[in-house]
Amino acid sequence: MKELTLENKIIRYENKLFNIIDKYEKGINNTNLFLRNQIFKLIFIHEKLFFAFIELLKLTGLVMRYSTFPLHWIWINLELKKKEGDITDLPIFQMGAHYFWGKPKAGKSTVVYHAMMDYAYFSGKCSYTTEYMELPRQNVYGHDYYYHQVFDPSDFYVEGKQVAGFNTNLFNIIVYEEMLAKYQQRLNKTKVYNDEVLPMITSIGTQRHQGIDLFYFISQLPRNDIALMQLLVGYHEPRIRKAFDYKYWLNTGEFRFYIKGWWIKSSKLELTSGYDYKVVQTRKWWYKNKYREDFDYFNRLNMKMEFDKLPKFKGREMKA
């Protein structure tokens, strides 16, 4: 037998080695294919079982809903109350002009201030106010700043026309504090009165075009200019409710009360003639104080500054 050369031996060895590698590769591929098929079968089975379980839950839920009538209405009402998160459903946040009236300490200014903060957290915009309704806050550098912008109506309304626009990128509520001090209805025939009131009423009628959501008017009188009253979408009479701060007493031993919220009687106004109206669709509802900390910055005497500017009366000479 012919002896193999070294070259032939090498070729023969290579062929054997490649055959071993091919068999190993085929074995690995077959094993991977088998495992993959088994995994897919398991996934398919689990998928079928999962969807069958879902269908069973649906059927069980359907049976439970029908079989628990009418008791399930208790749960439904509880869940609906949890979902009442959109403040625009509240009467005082319906787009348009709103009139808040009541005697001193009834809670008119406090409820409006809370509404301003409530709407600011909701919309990201603050309010224009005719008075300093908030005290200054301080930033990290000790500088004072305010959320809401004080304005004078005469800056916007001159000689019966609106001469400036509101910055509605930052502010979307216009608040008139204490209408009794600003616009006395008995002066409605004077030029000074009409120069500001008439364009203000026009602003209410065009508020959507200007990007204004709400006008708030605060007064101690139940009525004002008839044109203003005709444009109102809300007529509100708040009653403030306070509660004993028990936690503060535990920590300090001092008695203190905080605003718990307001009972508000909200109504619509229905015209009875061109010069009169009647109150209709009255609804009484509870408005909870959600931002107690913000009342640390509420200016309770927001008109005091104006009276402090007046010269003090020195008194008359007293004679016997």
Image (cartoon, rainbow, N blue to C red):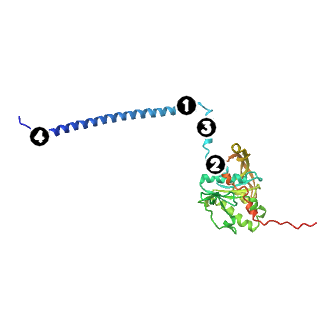
Mark 3: few/some/many CA within 10 Å (<14, 14-19, 20+): few
Mark 2 and mark 3 lie on one chain; the one further toward the N terminus is 3
Amino acid type at mark 4? Asn
Q: Which residue is mark 2?
A: 89
**Sequence-wise first label, 2 or 4:** 4
Which badge, 1 or 3, is on the more N-terminal residue? 1
Which residue lies under the disc numbered 3?
76
The C terminus: image quadrant: bottom right
* Residue 170 vs residue 312, the one in the foreground: 312
The image quarter containing residue 34 is top left
Identity, as a three-letter code, of the amino acid under mark 1: Val
Determine which residue is flagged by label 1. 63
Distance, label 4 to label 3, CA atoms, is 89 Å
Q: Is residue 216 above or below residue 12?
A: below
Q: Position of residue 87 (x, y in %)?
A: 63, 49
Nearest the eye: 177 or 55: 177
3D distance between C-alphas at marks 4 and 1: 82 Å
The label nearer to you, 1 versus 3, is 3
Q: Earlier in the sequence, mark 1 or mark 2?
A: 1
The amino acid type found where label 3 is placed reads: Ile
Visible residue check, residue 262: no
Q: Residue at x 68, y 62 (%)?
A: 200
Q: CA distance from mark 2 to mark 3?
A: 19 Å
Given the image, on which type of amino acid does mark 2 rest? Answer: Asp
